[in-house]
Image (spheres, grey):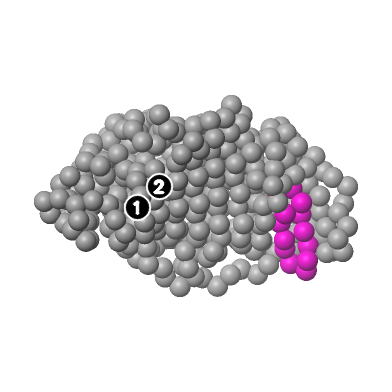
């Protein structure tokens, strides 16, 4: 059975989250934050913002079955990362949609709009509405899947509510498709952590001997907010930012390229993946990879993964092309909450 890496994430109750237009339309993107100068004082926070997605790469799970409780299991660290929320939200939607889509598509042959409500394992419900816009009785470009979660719980400490609209742009099969996900007031609580997500992202999914997911932030941007007793942050991913993930039977490769700003940073950075982060299924952190972070006044930070235990930071604060002596930081310290 084919499988995909599940980045189970928390989306949580953030009252000011605004709904993105149904079917993937975008509101105007907010004005970008001012670029942040990277210094010796903030380099660890900058590195965290650039690298937090690597902790969301744990635990291969099955996409194409109905064992949703298994599919939504995750490592605890991933639940506390904003990028984990972005990836997790996308895969939540795909995991819930497509096993049910196959059944809903049968009903669509008799009518263009079919809805099915399923009870979640530990309480709450999930409703999938399939709109067959061309009336062909199957999945095709332009069709929409509207996934509405009402206090849906598949794990003892998680609860998901809100709506995710997936508009298909292409459909070859359940293992090869593309489209746009619009997150409409999606909220999740997980233990004492709360995260919210709002905006849209285009998705290309292909599953062969390996699984490849490519996401590009829509023209209205995407916001992920996280709040826990010991950590809170809001990350704004700017339009065009690209997240890429490839899973094999033993490891996952991950990259991010584009600009983002966060409350914790107080400014904007641009991330370029020079070598994809690679994480073995059995590890809590990536064991290799390198990213460059660009800030104001040509300041740069080079972040190199030395092992699944250590990360190296090299700073060029004044943009003269000369990096400082490396600083070695344990993964656990870099991403501690």
Q: Secondary structure at mark 2?
A: strand
- Nearest the camera: 162 or 102? 102
Horizontally, is 119 left or right of 25 in the view? left
Q: Position of residue 22 (x, y in %)?
A: 32, 63
The residue segment tinted magenta is 291-303
Q: Does residue 160 appear in the picture of this structure?
A: no
Q: Which mark is residue 171?
A: 1
Q: Quadrant of residue 36?
A: bottom right
Q: Position of residue 219 (x, y in %)?
A: 48, 68
Q: Position of residue 194 (x, y in %)?
A: 46, 45
The residue at the far top in this view is: 282
Mark 2 in CB contact with mark 1 (< 8 angstroms): yes
Horizontally, is 5 left or right of 264 in the view? left
- Height in image: 182 above or below 187? below
Q: Residues within 10 Å of mark 2 (few under 14, many from 20)?
A: some
Horizontally, is 120 left or right of 260 in the view? left
Q: Which mark is residue 22?
A: none
Task: Please tell me which residue is depicted at 50% across the width and 38% down the height of the picture.
Answer: 210
């Amino acid at each position: 059975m084919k499988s995909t890496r599940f980045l189970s994430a928390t989306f949580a109750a953030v009252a000011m989250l605004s709904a993105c237009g149904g079917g993937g339309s975008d509101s105007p993107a907010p004005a970008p934050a001012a670029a942040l100068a990277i210094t010796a004082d903030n380099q660890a926070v900058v590195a965290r913002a650039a690298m937090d997605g690597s902790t969301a790469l744990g635990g291969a799970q099955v996409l194409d079955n109905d064992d949703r409780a298994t599919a939504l299991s995750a490592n605890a660290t991933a639940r506390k990362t904003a990028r984990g929320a972005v990836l997790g939200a996308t895969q939540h939607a795909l995991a819930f949609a497509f096993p049910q889509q196959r059944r809903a598509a049968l009903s669509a042959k008799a009518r263009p709009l079919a809805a099915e409500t399923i009870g979640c394992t530990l309480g709450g419900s999930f409703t999938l509405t399939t709109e067959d816009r061309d009336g062909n009785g199957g999945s095709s470009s332009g069709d929409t899947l509207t996934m509405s979660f009402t206090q849906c719980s598949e794990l003892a400490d998680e609860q998901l509510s809100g709506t995710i609209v997936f508009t298909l742009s292409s459909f070859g099969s359940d293992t090869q498709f593309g489209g746009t996900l619009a997150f409409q007031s999606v909220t999740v609580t997980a233990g004492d952590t709360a995260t919210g997500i709002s905006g849209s992202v285009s998705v290309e999914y292909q599953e062969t001997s390996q699984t490849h997911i490519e996401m590009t932030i829509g023209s209205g941007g995407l916001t992920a907010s996280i709040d826990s007793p010991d950590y809170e942050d809001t990350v704004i991913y700017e339009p065009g930012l690209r997240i890429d993930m490839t899973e094999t039977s033993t490891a996952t490769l991950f990259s991010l390229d584009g600009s983002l700003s966060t409350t914790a940073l107080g400014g904007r950075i641009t991330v370029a993946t020079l070598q994809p982060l690679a994480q073995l299924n059995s590890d809590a952190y990536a064991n290799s990879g390198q990213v460059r972070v660009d800030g104001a006044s040509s300041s740069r930070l080079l972040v190199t993964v030395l092992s699944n235990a250590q990360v190296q930071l090299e700073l060029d604060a004044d943009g003269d092309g000369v990096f400082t002596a490396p600083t070695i930081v344990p993964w656990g310290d870099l991403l501690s909450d």
